[in-house]
Amino acid sequence: MVTLTPAAQLAISRFIENAGTPVAGLRVSVSDGGCSGYKYGLQLETTVSEQDTSLSFGEVCLLIDPESLPLLQGCVVDFVESLDESGFKFENPNAKAACNCGKSFAA
């Protein structure tokens, strides 16, 4: 199961409100790439695939494809806003190593 912090839920809600088109949910995915082997992806989606796992957090719906799901099990997604940084942060128990930017990992 993937968990969203309240800060992440609020940030996603703001993105959905400002999307300008109806949004079915936020897709969280993992793909090859980044400096550590895998990289996280976030994308607002207008439709849900039959193969997606759909997780609801209040008004926010996360969509996860079957290939990404095992690599995201137990992951906590947070959103930080400070003078130094702003963006989504992933705490992933499946990551054996991560790069300094926090956007990629090795499993």
Image (cartoon, helix red, strand yellow):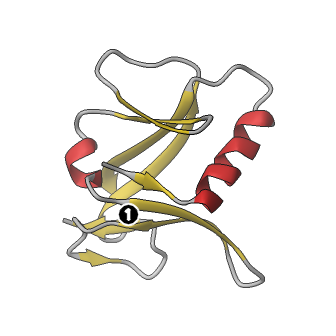
The answer to which of 29 and 17 lies nearer the viewer is 17
Q: Where residue 66 sits in the image (x, y, percent)? A: 24, 33
- Residue found 18% across the figure and 65% down from its top: 107
Q: Residues within 10 Å of mark 1 (few under 14, many from 20)?
A: some
- Residue found 58% across the figure and 20% down from its top: 46
Q: Is residue 14 left or right of residue 55?
A: right
Is 2 rendered above or below residue 85? above
- Residue found 78% across the figure and 83% down from its top: 83
Q: Where residue 65 sits in the image (x, y, percent)? A: 32, 33
Q: Is residue 79 left or right of residue 65?
A: right
Is 1 rendered above or below residue 35? above
Q: Secondary structure at mark 1?
A: loop
Please tell me in which quadrant of the rendered image residue 24 appears: top right
Q: Where residue 45 sits in the image (x, y, percent)? A: 55, 27
Residue type at mark 1 is: Gly
Task: State the residue position of label 1.
Answer: 34
- Residue found 45% across the figure and 19% down from its top: 48
The answer to which of 3 and 79 lies nearer the viewer is 3
Q: Where residue 63 sits in the image (x, y, percent)? A: 43, 33
